[in-house]
Amino acid sequence: MLTAETDYDGEVFTADLSGASAGGARFLECTFQRCDLSELRAPRARFSETSLYAVHGAGLDLAESSWADCLVQGARMGAVALYGSELARVSFEGCKVEFLNLRGATLLDVEFVDCQLVEADFGEARLTRVSFEGCRLVSPDFTKGTFKDVDLTGADLAGPRGVAGLRGATVSALQLIDLGPALAAELGLKVAD
């Protein structure tokens, strides 16, 4: 079982961790494999060189946590609170996450590959060198985001909100056409046929 303010070095977790409390814990070179992380409480935890494989669960509190050189692969999660967190050199591969809260988070050199993100909140987040290859983003919120070298060309954007916050991101010509109605609505433009 996890405990708060504890150092974990090279541990492999395969048990049910639902409802665990690990606020302020530090994970170095750890592996989480097929764990149920439902209702995990780990605000301000630090994850370094840690991998999560096929983890699942809903209601995770990872607010204000920090992640460096981590891999999240095949995760199925819902209602994940990562607001105010710092993610550097993190890869998300083949994940499905609903209600991902990254509001006010800082993402640096992060890649999302073949992921489905439903109602992800990037509001007021700072993204630098972030890519979304082969991803589907359903109703993402980009309100007041800060984007630098963010590549959305490989993503399918469905029903985005706060699109004015995408300033600095790269989109394809086809995506720009799809974003047109949302941009017009946000700017208060009337579009005549």
Image: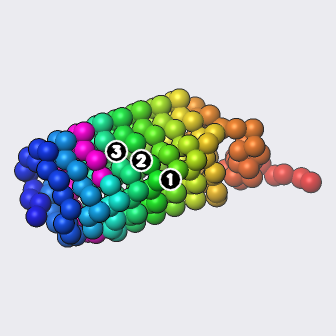
x 29%, y 63%: residue: 34
Q: Which residue is mark 3?
A: 71
Image location (x, y in percent) of residue 64 = 27, 48
Looking at the image, residue 73 sits to the left or right of residue 35; the answer is right
x 40%, y 42%: residue: 91
On whether residue 41 falls in the magenta region, the answer is yes
x 11%, y 44%: residue: 9
Looking at the image, residue 159 sits to the left or right of residue 48; the answer is right
Residue 122 visible within the image:
yes
The crowd level at tag 1 (other Cα within 10 Å; few <14, some 14-19, many 20+) is many
Chain part drawn in magenta: 37-52
* Front-most of residues 83 and 136: 136
Pointer 2 and pointer 3: residues touching (CB < 8 Å)? no
- What secondary structure prevails in the magenta region? loop
Count the marks.
Answer: 3
99 vs 43: above or below: below
The disc placed on residue 92 is 2
Pointer 1 and pointer 2: residues touching (CB < 8 Å)? yes
Residue 99 visible within the image:
no
The disc placed on residue 115 is 1
